[in-house]
């Protein structure tokens, strides 16, 4: 019913929060991957540990948590989900949503999301019937928010009337129906997308290595975008300081040899996107102990050997070659010309060429300007966020798989 869908569940602070634990279990039973955010008030009724145990994911609680922000920023958290579900949705949360307030993590996520939002209200009957709440509900309905309930029934406070949170099983059914009818695009559903990301590290000795400045942000964004498009995604990542994308199978490696081995092991794939900045050379014989500097002695001489060419290897497979192979060309000059040359030499279907010269300030940053080089010509995209580049590239790949021109 919700196979492969990622649901961001925001638990509000009300007595009905205890039902959210059963809701997590039922969402998972329906095939969803549940990411939980709890308001401070919600933690007075249920614990983050309980929600984490049931969801199998970390629970997010604090807008200013250094740990959470390092692992997944609040903007990204609101975007990786297929839908946002607020249950219970208290009168306070509905008011924050209606007026665009963002003074805690939950309300910030709701303001930042661009995905379908479902709310399951739960509050005292008089709070639900209050004119202020009615105005907020009308505003939210106009904004496209889907309401599930509330139901009539006895309240924890002893009163009777509308305000009870809908039953968890009914909420799951409503979310599944809502997503099905909303036409959430899944152009890569049923496809396997294999992505490489980040740098590789080639050891010199146990404490030193050859590498580059790749942050992995573009590759990880592509993996996340492919997952949002419905693909089954495998990400083979070199060492990076950013979190793994949600819902993606991630294999961590260090060297180019390890990356090639894991890429080959992940085949077959429908699409291979080689985003990683793989080191061209490795040290032929890394030292087994730290190389010491000796006064008066010349610096050590490093004998280098060529690393495997992962993109060319996969592009030229006679068996198990992905239908679509996409490479990246990070260049400091003559970007398009080098991209065309690389396309011919590597044997891939597309080259995404970008300028990584110091003046461009792209490598390690959050924005990118790329040129899509193919046998049909060059399409230049404007400077935009790496997440936007990722979404546009995934859409291009989906069209090519369907036999359309990008």
Image (cartoon, helix red, strand yellow):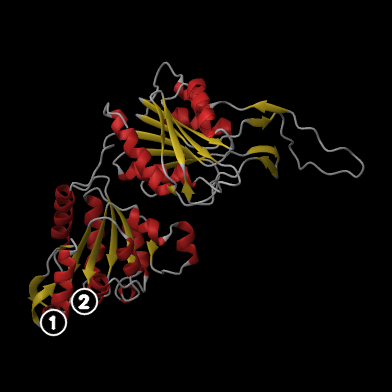
Q: Does residue 44 appear in this view?
A: yes
Comparing 128 with 399, the one in front is: 399
Q: Residues within 10 Å of mark 1 (few under 14, many from 20)?
A: few
> What residue appears at the point 46 percent right and 67 percent down from the top-left corner?
65
Q: Is residue 38 left or right of residue 328?
A: left
Residue 356 vertical placement versus 47 (above, below): above
Q: Is residue 41 left or right of residue 237?
A: left
> What residue appears at the point 18 percent right and 74 percent down from the top-left corner?
136
Q: Which mark is residue 84?
A: none
Q: CA distance from mark 1 to mark 2?
A: 10 Å
**Mark 1 / mark 2, whichever is N-terminal:** 2
Q: Which mark is residue 91?
A: 2
Q: Position of residue 155 (x, y in %)?
A: 13, 78
Give the secondary structure at mark 2. Answer: helix
Q: Position of residue 82 (x, y in %)?
A: 27, 51
Q: Position of residue 309 (x, y in %)?
A: 55, 26
> What residue appears at the point 43 percent right and 36 percent down from the top-left corner?
195
Say which quarter of the image contains residue 83: bottom left
Comparing 364 with 63, the one in front is: 364
Residue 360 vertical placement versus 70 (above, below): above
Q: Position of residue 333 (x, y in %)?
A: 58, 35
Q: Does residue 58 appear in this view?
A: no
Residue designated by label 1: 130
Q: Is residue 256 left or right of residue 169?
A: right
Give the secondary structure at mark 1. Answer: loop
Q: Residues within 10 Å of mark 2 (few under 14, many from 20)?
A: many
**Which quadrant, please, contains the C terminus?**
top left
Q: Are marks 1 and 2 in contact (CB under 8 Å)?
A: yes
């Amino acid at each position: 019913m919700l196979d492969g869908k990622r649901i961001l569940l925001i638990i509000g602070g009300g007595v009905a929060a205890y039902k959210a634990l059963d809701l997590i279990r039922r969402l998972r039973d329906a095939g969803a991957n549940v990411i939980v955010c709890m308001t401070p008030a919600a933690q007075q009724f249920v614990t983050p540990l309980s929600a984490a145990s049931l969801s199998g994911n970390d629970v997010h609680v604090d807008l200013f948590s250094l740990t959470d922000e390092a692992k997944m920023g609040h903007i990204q958290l609101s975007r990786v989900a297929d839908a946002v579900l607020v249950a219970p949705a208290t009168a306070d949360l509905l008011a924050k949503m209606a007026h665009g307030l963002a003074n805690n993590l939950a309300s910030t996520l709701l303001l930042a999301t661009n995905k379908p939002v479902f709310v399951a209200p739960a509050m005292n009957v008089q709070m639900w019937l209050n004119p202020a709440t009615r105005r907020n509900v009308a505003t939210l309905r106009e904004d496209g928010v889907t309401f599930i309930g509330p139901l009539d029934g006895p309240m924890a406070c002893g009163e009777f009337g509308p305000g009870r949170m809908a039953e968890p099983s009914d909420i799951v059914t409503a979310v599944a129906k809502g997503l099905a009818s909303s036409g959430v695009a899944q152009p890569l559903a049923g496809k396997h997308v294999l992505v490489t990301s980040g740098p590789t590290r080639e050891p010199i000795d146990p404490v030193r290595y050859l590498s580059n400045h790749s942050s992995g942000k573009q590759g990880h964004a592509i993996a996340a975008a492919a997952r949002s498009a419905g693909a089954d995604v495998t990400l083979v990542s070199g060492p990076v300081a950013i979190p793994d994308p949600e819902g993606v199978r991630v294999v961590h490696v260090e060297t180019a040899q390890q990356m090639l081995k894991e890429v080959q092991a992940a085949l077959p794939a429908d699409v291979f996107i080689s985003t990683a900045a793989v080191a061209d050379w490795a040290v032929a014989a890394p030292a087994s102990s730290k190389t010491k500097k000796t006064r008066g002695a010349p610096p050590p001489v490093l004998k280098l050997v060529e690393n495997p060419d992962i993109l060319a290897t996969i592009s030229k497979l006679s068996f198990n070659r992905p239908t679509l192979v996409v490479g990246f060309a990070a260049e400091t000059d003559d970007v398009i010309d080098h991209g065309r040359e690389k396309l011919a030499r590597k044997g891939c279907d597309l080259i995404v060429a970008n300028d990584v010269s110091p003046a461009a300030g792209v490598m390690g940053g959050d924005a990118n300007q790329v040129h899509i080089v193919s046998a049909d010509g060059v399409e230049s995209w404007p400077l935009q966020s790496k997440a936007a580049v990722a979404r546009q590239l995934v859409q291009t790949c989906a069209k090519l798989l369907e036999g359309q021109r990008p």
